[in-house]
Image: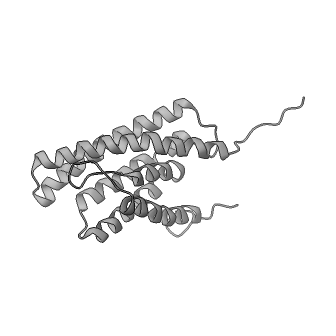
Amino acid sequence: MANKKGAKGLSVQAVVATGIGIAIVFVLKRFLPIPTGVPNTTIDLGEAFLAFLGALFGPAVGGLTAFFAHLFTDLTWGDPWWSWIIADALFGIAIGYSRNFLKIKQEPLTTAKLVKFNVLQVAANIVCWGVIAPLGDIWIYSQPAGKVFLQGIVATLTNSIAIGVVATLLLIAYGKTQTQNKKLTKE
């Protein structure tokens, strides 16, 4: 099937993936949060699905999905918390770059690629949740540093674990469904 581009350069497949991704990530964030004991911080299975989606479709899908799913989730709880919405969008963009080395639709998925994916996701979690979100909370909302850095550390750890387990398993399962280009050989 042809990969037709839209007016902004996103394929129809990427636009559909974004819409479906927003819905799934929203449902996971809104209805399946697992409390951590730290206020406003949960084990977020939506981040695991977001990482999987970004790995398949790239940074634009990852960033847009994260932004809108997080925004819609916040709106159902009250007001949008922009520092975390922006951090989530940046995380979606960053994890989307894993598509460039995973090449899961073209090449077999290897342990080395999964390790690289998980190194990237942990680094992106550290930057986005451990640095950007807390600094945004301090700058935008004048929140106490101790509180927001604790939330950021907990979010970094729980997201890294959720993605390391759930997204890795999703990538492995998806990889097994793909038929890579293989040369036929004469026996």
Say left or right for 52 vs 120.
right
Q: Residue at x 38, y 62 (%)?
A: 31
- Seen from the viewer's position, the closer of residues 65 and 32 is 32
Give coordinates of residue 42: x percent, y percent. 30, 51
- Seen from the viewer's position, the closer of residues 62 and 175 is 175
Q: Can residue 104 be seen at all in this image of the molecule?
A: no
Say left or right for 126 vs 3.
left
Give coordinates of residue 73: x percent, y percent. 34, 65
Give coordinates of residue 24: x percent, y percent. 47, 62
Image quarter (top left, top right, bottom left or bottom right) of the N terminus? bottom right
Q: Which residue lies furthest to the right in this view?
A: 187
- Seen from the viewer's position, the closer of residues 87 and 27 is 27
Give coordinates of residue 158: x percent, y percent. 33, 43
Say left or right for 51 vs 143.
right
Q: Residue at x 19, y 54 (%)?
A: 136
Say left or right for 119 vs 126.
right
Q: Residue at x 25, y 67 (%)?
A: 80
The colour style of the image is one colour
